[in-house]
Amino acid sequence: MNPGIRIQLLRLVDVVSIITCAVVAFVLRLSGPDVHHAYATCTSFSAVLALTLFPAMGAYESWRGRSLPGLASRLMLAWLAVQTCSLLLMFSLHITENISRLWFASWTAMAAALLTATRFVARSVLRQMRRAGHNLRNVAIVGSATQCARVLGTIGQYPGSGFRAAAALHLNTSAGTANNNVPIFNELCSFAGHVRASQVREVWLALSLSDENLVAAVAEEFSGDLINIRLIPDVSSFALFGGSTTDLLGAPALNLFGSPLDYAPLLKEVFDRAFALVSLLSLAPLMLVIAALVKMSSPGPVFFMQRRQGMDGRVFRIYKFRTMYVHQNDDGVVKQAARGDTRITRVGAFLRRTSLDELPQFLNVLRGEMSVVGPRPHAIEHDEIYRNCVSHYIQRYRIKPGITGWAQVNGYRGETDQIEKMQKRVEHDLYYIRNWTFWLDLRIVLSTIAKGFGGTNAY
């Protein structure tokens, strides 16, 4: 479908949806035959304003290769802006007292749902068309054999995205044809000729940041053509968390090392606080019994507190039930508990074996210092040791440390008397950070409960 026609149809559908929802909300929420002119004024203004603000706020940008949640959020933001402006107009005309707040809220919510639903239906229809081979955009790819294969695989994995590979340029291989019948060139001149002859309108540069000469050469070659040149930088060799982009002072910036969960902190925060509160309330009797046993086991406080690093290196005090006899550590030295450690009390041995000594850390979660799920924090003295001998060790602290984590449910808990053990734990922690989802958190919590709190490495 021609993009211009698609946009005009969408604009028409949006206006009809807005007016329809206003009428339906009036019928459902108001009674009586009289229709005050204020309702018509408000509805008309919102419909007209939507025709102006929706395009300006990107509600009609191309869907090709874009995620539905991102498009829906942009549409909702535009709709809220329209309704906010509509309210301001009603205030300026002094007719807000003639409009039902219940009607306005119902109309706004119904229109938001209908606008999103129409986008979903239209996108689904378009995806089916593209899967059938219609409305596809040909693209040519430049890069090494590995990089091109990765991009070609991604295009093949999402046939409904609307892209079709038409050619590839591998400067370090011989010419030929890929498995999916994509012609491969090894000279820029012949590649450019094929792109022009096939009327390809997209060239993707799947290159590393060190290939600036090739980027410049391709850009110069197509500088006289109306062809979109897009750079897909290969940063897999040094971008720890996938090389996401962010807006930095109005300019796009590539995140090589950066906090990877910035896009979803709210859901994780809400889950953490709610889970911690419920856990503390339900486990309060058990924790009182443990506190009494700790107090009777040996002289000293009930809780053990130690300085640990949190997210972005912020230091906090972690809470645990005390499991050892009170003793003095050498300055700057923290000795890990080992099997048969004489410093551990009899009650403490049971608590450590079952991980019940960790229950007070739900207080740290409530305070916002820890998460229910995340990399386990280590003593600061150990951090200074491991950060210099375990690759990417310190990157674990890009997010909040957790009471349990991906490493722990996979058996990497307890004493780390060998560098290899810590390396494995760090690898699992980084895997969790790269692949975080809310469902992964739930899986880890359920796995922790199902497997029990014990373990062969816990002592």
Image (spheres, helix red, strand yellow):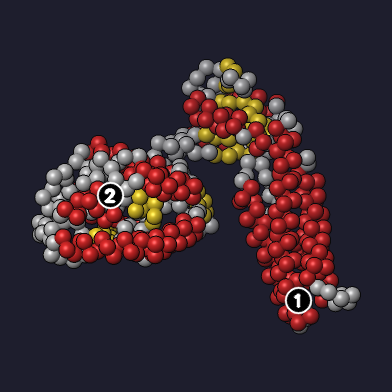
Q: How many dots with numbers?
A: 2
What is the number of the mark on residue 100?
1
Viewer-closest of 289 and 324: 289
Viewer-closest of 20 and 133: 20
Say which label, 2 or 1, has the lower sequence index: 1
Name the residue located 48 percent from the left edge and 27 percent from the top edge.
146
Name the residue located 39 percent from the left edge and 56 percent from the top edge.
371
Mark 2 highlights which residue? 354
Amino acid carrying mark 1 in the image: Ser
Viewer-closest of 434 and 421: 421
Residue 55 in sight: no
Name the residue located 13 percent from the left edge and 48 percent from the top edge.
341
In the rendering, at what x and y percent does residue 128 appear? 72, 36
Is residue 319 positioned above or below 214 on the image? Answer: below
Q: Describe the element under mark 2 as helix, strand or loop.
A: helix
C-alpha gap between disc 2 and disc 1: 59 Å
In the rendering, at what x and y percent does residue 355 appear? 28, 51
